[in-house]
Image (cartoon, rainbow, N blue to C red):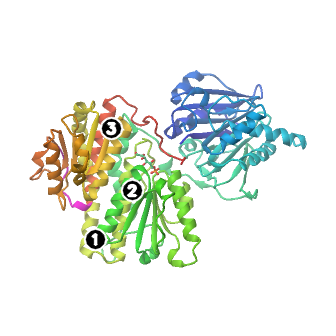
């Protein structure tokens, strides 16, 4: 949610800020703004625009703001509508302090009331605007102690202010009186410092830094830092100076290239054969002695032996991957598994049971609900003095360096490469693969499947890359054509059963989030218990009918829809029974276990083409953001 970029050094700040904001726009695009310490006037020049970053760029209209220290922000609205007055940066009354913030200040109303009583007037409806006013008040108090007007004084003022803030935030502060300094701080929202030569950039995510340097220092929770061209000072919440080594950015975290695709989303759908290949090369390792493949995750998996049940915590698309995962873990590997919405788990966790593995799934590694739910689970388990209840944790993420990467020691990095399109596609696919890996591992450890059955599943996984390539080849044009006929529909129902029920949910989520068409996914057998009332000839039904255990049942459920005049689209192999479909998006016959990995491809393509046909901003759909760092 919201992207922050801040820079101090010797190069002109404006192009660095704009370049950083371009890379962060996926985090929010309701408005954007920059503030720079103008080196000619030693005052702060602020510029903001409503809507997409291109509006800010056209506002700036080649303006040449001199100055090498600045902050920038791209907003996803929480407090206050997406209007100009609510765009960041926000300033104090004199305009000498500027602040950008990502997060939510939960006690802002109390703070605002107090400031208003002191005579401060506010220009926005945001929670953030209290911060520059509080810093101003703090600096006034500090000036009475004869502290110099410099970065260290600003650091003290910001530290005092954040001790009064409740909620989660990442923020960056400029003060015209300390013209080379930047103060940045974070609590439960990401912030990374990039180390250049004699200059530093700080941002919410690595793409904003990658053009500048590949040496980074992720800030830890509750840290505050002073950045000047001469160096950085980082302090923890006890005001202890922190010293640690920087790390290098992975190449995959640096590349954001649309190549010849019209949208990142289409490119990322097309990345999936490569994603599969990469994942298989990383985690499916051939034992040279016996020629058999094994899953090798990069942590000691001995602790999995004692696991008796699994709880998986996730949101959105990651939750759908978790649902397929839980199906595999229970039905293939024989371990009881439950999936929870992270936002629900936080306030109604299940009673604690012993020998439980908790898995957090988040492509961004920053989703506030998921991080907080995991945090809560770690705390409540750690407080019990019985090792059967201790936290056993695994995280499945695309961002090893993210908050979840620091929170959980056992990381399955899905290695999907950076995903720019807000709608998750290749990261979903790679999360699925990671669950196949876990199910294989557990089936092996628990001896719940024969070596033959395990080998069969592994063989199917190994065949994936060319199959996915063929599916893309086959369905890109056909789904574009189908989109032409369906771009104006109002409602779509997605049906699936068993392992493909979560794929129906994911198909519906993809369609609604990028095309704004109402779509709902149901377990196919559940349709007759209510949703069937929605059906008529204007409501197409997309039915996932893979060969296997529930094929006949899904076909019968599709019949029920056909009898209500719905246009039927099948995601199915061309076998007896599928002639019922008005349109068949043909999938090669496969082992049912593997079918979600195939069925999702035409659904992604169809959603993409419908949204593109409607002329919508596929990569940055309205009201959404790639990384949801607020509760
Ligand atoms: C859907 C989508 C969202 C995310 C959800 C969780 O395309 O992108 O539903 O899946 O916000 O995000 P992560 O996986 O980053 O925790």
Mark nearer the N terminus (3 vs 1): 1
In this orientation, does residue 16 appear?
no
294 in magenta: no
In the image shown, does 179 or 161 lie closer to the viewer?
161
Residue at x-position 36% and y-position 70%: 336
> Which residue is identified by label 2?
431
Q: Position of residue 212 (x, y in %)?
A: 59, 42
Q: Are marks 3 and 2 in contact (CB under 8 Å)?
A: no
Label 1 environment density (alpha carbons within 10 Å; few <14, some 14–19, many ≥20):
many
Q: Nearer the viewer, residue 61 or 165?
A: 165
Q: Nearer the viewer, mark 3 or mark 1?
A: 3
Residue under numbered circle 3? 518
Q: CA distance from mark 3 to mark 1?
A: 39 Å
Disc 1 target residue: 454
Per the image, label 1 sits on a secondary structure element best described as helix
Inspect the magenta stretch and tell me whether residue 588 lies in it: yes
Q: Earlier in the sequence, mark 2 or mark 1?
A: 2
546 over 542 or under it: above or below: below
Range of magenta residues? 584-593
Position of residue 83 relative to residue 364, above or below, is above
Residue 54: x and y, percent?
51, 27
**Image spot of residue 103 (x, y percent):** 59, 44
Question: Is label 2's Cβ within 8 Å of ligand 1?
Answer: yes
Q: Nearer the viewer, residue 120 or 37?
A: 120
Q: Position of residue 377 (x, y in %)?
A: 53, 64
Residue placed most toward the observer, 560 or 595 = 560
- Which numbered disc, 3 or 2, marks the residue closer to the eye? 3
């Amino acid at each position: 949610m919201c992207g922050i970029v801040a820079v101090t050094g010797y190069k002109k700040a404006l192009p660095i800020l704009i370049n950083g904001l371009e890379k962060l726009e996926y985090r929010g695009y309701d408005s954007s703004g920059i503030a720079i310490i103008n080196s000619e006037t030693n005052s702060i020049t602020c510029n903001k625009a409503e809507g997409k970053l291109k509006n800010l760029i056209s506002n700036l209209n080649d303006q040449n703001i001199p100055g090498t220290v600045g902050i920038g922000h791209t907003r996803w609205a929480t407090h206050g509508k997406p209007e100009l007055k609510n765009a960041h940066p926000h300033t104090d009354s004199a305009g000498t302090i500027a602040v950008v913030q990502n997060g939510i200040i939960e006690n802002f109303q109390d703070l605002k009331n107090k400031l208003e009583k002191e005579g401060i007037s506010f220009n926005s409806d945001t929670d953030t605007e209290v911060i520059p006013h509080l810093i101003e008040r703090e600096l006034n108090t500090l000036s009475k102690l004869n502290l110099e007007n410099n970065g260290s004084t600003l650091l003290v003022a910001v530290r005092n202010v954040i001790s009064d803030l409740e909620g989660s935030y990442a923020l960056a502060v400029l003060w015209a009186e300390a013209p080379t300094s930047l103060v940045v701080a974070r609590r439960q929202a990401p912030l990374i410092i990039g180390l250049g030569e004699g200059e530093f950039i700080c941002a919410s995510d690595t793409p904003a830094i990658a053009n500048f340097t590949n040496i980074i220092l992720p800030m830890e929770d509750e840290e505050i830092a002073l950045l000047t061209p001469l160096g950085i000072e980082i302090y923890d919440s006890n005001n202890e100076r922190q010293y640690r080594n920087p790390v290098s950015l992975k190449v995959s975290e640096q590349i954001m290239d649309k190549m010849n695709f019209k949208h990142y989303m289409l490119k990322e759908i097309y990345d999936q054969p490569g994603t599969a290949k990469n994942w298989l090369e990383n985690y499916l390792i051939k034992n040279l002695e016996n020629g058999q493949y094994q899953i090798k995750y990069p942590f000691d998996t001995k602790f999995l032996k004692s696991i008796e049940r699994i709880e998986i915590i996730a949101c959105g698309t990651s939750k759908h991957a978790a649902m397929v995962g839980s199906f595999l873990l229970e039905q293939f590997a024989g371990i009881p598994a439950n999936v929870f919405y992270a936002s629900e788990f936080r306030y109604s966790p299940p009673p604690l049971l012993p020998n439980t593995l908790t898995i957090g799934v988040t492509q961004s590694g920053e989703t506030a609900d998921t991080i907080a739910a995991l945090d809560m689970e770690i705390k409540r388990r750690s407080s019990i003095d019985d090792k059967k209840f201790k936290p056993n944790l695994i995280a499945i993420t695309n961002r090893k360096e993210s908050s979840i990467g620091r929170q959980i020691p056992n990381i399955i990095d899905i290695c999907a490469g950076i995903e720019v399109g807000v709608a998750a596609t290749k990261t979903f696919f790679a999360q699925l693969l990671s669950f196949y890996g876990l199910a294989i591992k557990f089936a092996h450890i628990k001896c719940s499947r024969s070596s033959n059955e395990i080998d069969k599943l592994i063989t199917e996984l190994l065949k994936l890359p060319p199959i996915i390539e063929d599916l893309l080849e086959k369905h890109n044009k056909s789904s574009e054509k189908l989109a032409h006929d369906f771009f104006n529909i109002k409602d779509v129902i997605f049906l699936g059963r068993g392992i493909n029920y979560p794929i129906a949910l994911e198909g519906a989520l993809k369609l609604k989030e990028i095309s704004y068409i109402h779509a709902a996914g149901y377990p196919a057998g559940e349709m007759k218990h209510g949703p069937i009332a929605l059906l008529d000839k204007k409501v197409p039904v997309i039915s996932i009918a893979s060969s296997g255990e529930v094929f006949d049942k899904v076909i019968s459920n599709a019949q029920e829809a056909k009898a209500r005049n719905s246009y039927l689209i099948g995601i199915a192999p061309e076998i007896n029974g599928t002639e019922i479909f008005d349109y068949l998006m043909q999938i090669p016959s496969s082992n049912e276990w593997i079918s979600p990995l195939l069925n999702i491809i035409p659904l992604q393509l169809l959603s993409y083409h419908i949204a593109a046909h409607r002329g919508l901003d596929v990569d940055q759909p309205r009201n959404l953001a790639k990384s949801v760092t607020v509760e």
